[in-house]
């Protein structure tokens, strides 16, 4: 019995593995559509509650924190990920290092810019109030998330795994 596969068999096995990876990575983009709609509605309701129910700030913030922590906790388990339509994800070692640095850099700049803006506006005593601005911004963000969620996820996935062409899939 020959333990070495023929070149044709090896090529076919590699093609099968590559196709399986692509299928696993793109399956979550199609199956998580309901999650985009739910997240968009929650985002809009949270933003609208800022304008229409300002006295509910403590409960609103606690509710959003519970939802975010629950979502992250579900994504950390196999069953939770499958429930949320994320059957596979890139292995951490296959994420392009420049992408990871870029994400941290952009996030850090956003946090620093927000802190500077709050500090400057607080020191100058400037209070800018635009009626229903939070509701309008929430509606725009919800529409973008619902309409372009799969494309945004696919683009982020392509950017993250650009290093090796196809990354390892971790179920």
Image (cartoon, helix red, strand yellow):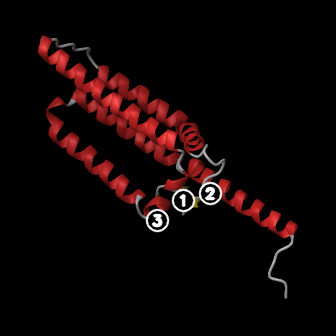
Q: What x and y, as percent, mark residue 43? A: 36, 36
Of the pair 126 and 47, the residue shown nearer to us: 126
State the quadrant of the N terminus.
bottom right
Inspect this view and state whether residue 85 appears. no
Mark 2 Cα shell of 10 Å, populated few (<14), some (14-19), many (≥20): some
Identify which residue is drawn at 54% across, 63% down: 171
- Distance between mark 3 and mark 1 Cα atoms: 8 Å
Of the pair 146 and 162, the residue shown nearer to us: 162
Identify which residue is drawn at 36% across, 40% down: 42
Identify which residue is drawn at 50% across, 47% down: 34
Q: Return the residue at label 2.
A: 24
Disc marking residue 140: none
Q: Are marks 1 and 2 in contact (CB under 8 Å)?
A: yes
Disc marking residue 87: 1
Mark 1 Cα shell of 10 Å, populated few (<14), some (14-19), many (≥20): many
- Distance between mark 3 and mark 2 Cα atoms: 14 Å
Q: Quadrant of residue 121?
A: top left
Q: Is residue 68 left or right of residue 163?
A: left
Of the pair 114 and 143, the residue shown nearer to us: 114
Q: Are marks 3 and 1 in contact (CB under 8 Å)?
A: no
Inspect this view and state whether residue 70 appears. yes
Identify which residue is drawn at 47% across, 30% down: 143
Q: Earlier in the sequence, mark 3 or mark 2?
A: 2
Q: Return the residue at label 3.
A: 78
Eyeballing the image, is 135 above or below 99?
above
- Mark 1 element type: loop
Q: What x and y, as percent, mark residue 96? A: 54, 45
């Amino acid at each position: 019995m020959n333990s070495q596969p023929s070149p044709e068999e090896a090529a076919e096995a590699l093609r099968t593995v590559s196709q399986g990876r692509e299928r696993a990575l793109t399956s979550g983009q199609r199956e998580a559509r309901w999650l985009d709609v739910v997240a968009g509605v929650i985002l809009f309701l949270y933003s609208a509650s800022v304008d229409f129910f300002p006295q509910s700030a403590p409960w609103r913030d606690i509710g959003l924190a519970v939802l975010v922590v629950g979502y992250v906790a579900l994504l950390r388990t196999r069953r939770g990920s499958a429930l949320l339509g994320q059957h596979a994800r890139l292995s951490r070692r296959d994420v392009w290092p420049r992408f990871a640095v870029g994400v941290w850099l952009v996030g850090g700049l956003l946090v620093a810019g927000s802190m500077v803006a709050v500090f400057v506006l607080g020191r100058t005593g400037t209070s800018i109030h635009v009626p229903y601005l939070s509701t309008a911004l929430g509606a725009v963000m919800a529409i973008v998330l619902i309409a372009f969620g799969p494309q945004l996820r696919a683009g982020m996935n392509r950017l993250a795994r650009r290093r090796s062409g196809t990354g390892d899939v971790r179920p």
